[in-house]
Image: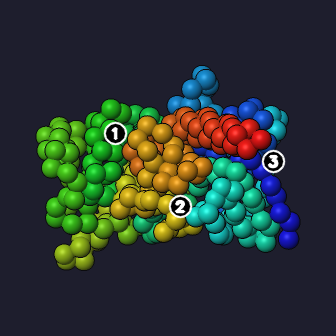
Amino acid sequence: MTTHTTRMLIIGSGPAGLTAAIYGARAGLAPIVVQGLQPGGQLTITTDVENYPGFRDVIQGPWLMAEMQAQAEHVGTRMMWDTITEVEIDNGPPFRAIGDSGDDYVAEVLVIATGAQAKWLGVPGEQALAGKGVSACATCDGFFYRGKKVAVIGGGNTAVEEALYLTNHSDDVTLIHRRGELRAEKILQDRLFAHPKISVVWNRRVEEFLGDPQAGGLTGLRLADTQTGAMSTFACEGAFVAIGHAPSTELFIDKLDMDESGYLVVEPGTPKTSHPGVFACGDVMDHTYRQAVTAAGTGCMAALDAERFLATREHARNAAAQAAE
């Protein structure tokens, strides 16, 4: 077992974590990034990225994350291939994290960038056709379905918002819901029902995503009537699973404040969590935007606030030492 000591420990290596690392390293904090189970975050399973600023042409998600990591390492970040299994926050700083490898990580500030994962239906064809007609983010991928027939699966705020957004690209949007009424806020429902480009299919459950990943991608959905059990086929070229996201916050239960959905609560307009010296950035604290560019922005904020936190502590220690002389 090895103990790794750093001024800034970052858990997670998506856009938020790596941006925090870049800023932290440039501030001389020699950060350590523990990459976790999915190094690079959700962008490593995203193929075409067309909305990240600075790139005129379509870029690949894995390439973008590799470039971010290379930049972070270039300016002084240490990347660790490990997964944190336990954290000790209450008495910190310093904070202690324990890796699956058995190694200890001790830091003066902790930046949490563990992200969130889209919830999937778990039915046949879903993962095979992911990125080939099946998506969990209309804002990310809706542009690729201009003029095509698309479906949104779900009944909450996320599903309704996705359906409304997709009308910017498609004239034929269908919301498919397994119940006979939506769970979304009434104001969103009113907008949905009034929109001429959106239709709703009630009491249907998606049993399978149809199509060939190697030849054209998604062609439709196999649906089951939740009242009669009757099967039917719904033809579409794009399907967006919108049943919510699950933030990766299990490590911090009863250690940091969370909202009812499990997202870390931060001081409004900042990445500051309920414990001094612990900062959260990216999708682990953002259930609204969930974009790579907004995650990177909050990663920058976390690093800047962490640097200020350390400077304030150092100033207080120096003042106390001078007073004691």
In which quadrant of the rendered view does residue 15 lie?
Answer: top right
Badge nearest the viewer, 1 or 3: 3
Q: How many marks?
A: 3
- Which image quarter is the C terminus in? top right
Instruction: From the image, tell me which residue sits under label 3.
Output: 78
Residue found 63% across the figure and 59% down from its top: 92
The secondary structure type at the circle numbered 3 is: strand
Locate residue 46 relative to residue 325 in the image: left or right: left
Give how far across and how far down residue 176 sits, in percent: 27, 57
Residue found 48% across the figure and 39% down from its top: 270
Taking depth in this image into account, of 187 and 152 the one nearest to the observer is 187
Q: Callout 3 environment at 10 Å: few (<14), some (14 to 19), or many (20+)?
A: some
The secondary structure type at the circle numbered 1 is: helix
Q: Earlier in the sequence, mark 1 or mark 3?
A: 3
Amino acid type at circle 1 is Leu
Q: Is residue 123 above or below residue 247?
A: below
Instruction: From the image, tell me which residue sits under label 1.
Output: 166
Residue found 53% across the figure and 55% down from its top: 275
Give how far across and how far down residue 298 sits, in percent: 54, 38
Q: Callout 1 environment at 10 Å: few (<14), some (14 to 19), or many (20+)?
A: many
Give how far across and how far down residue 104 sits, in percent: 77, 65
Residue farthest along the front direction in this orientation? 325
Taking depth in this image into account, of 67 and 125 the one nearest to the observer is 67
Instruction: From the image, tell me which residue sits under label 2.
Output: 248
Q: Is residue 115 visible?
A: no
Q: Earlier in the sequence, mark 3 or mark 2?
A: 3
Real-space Cα separation, disc 2 to disc 1, in angstroms = 27 Å
The secondary structure type at the circle numbered 2 is: loop
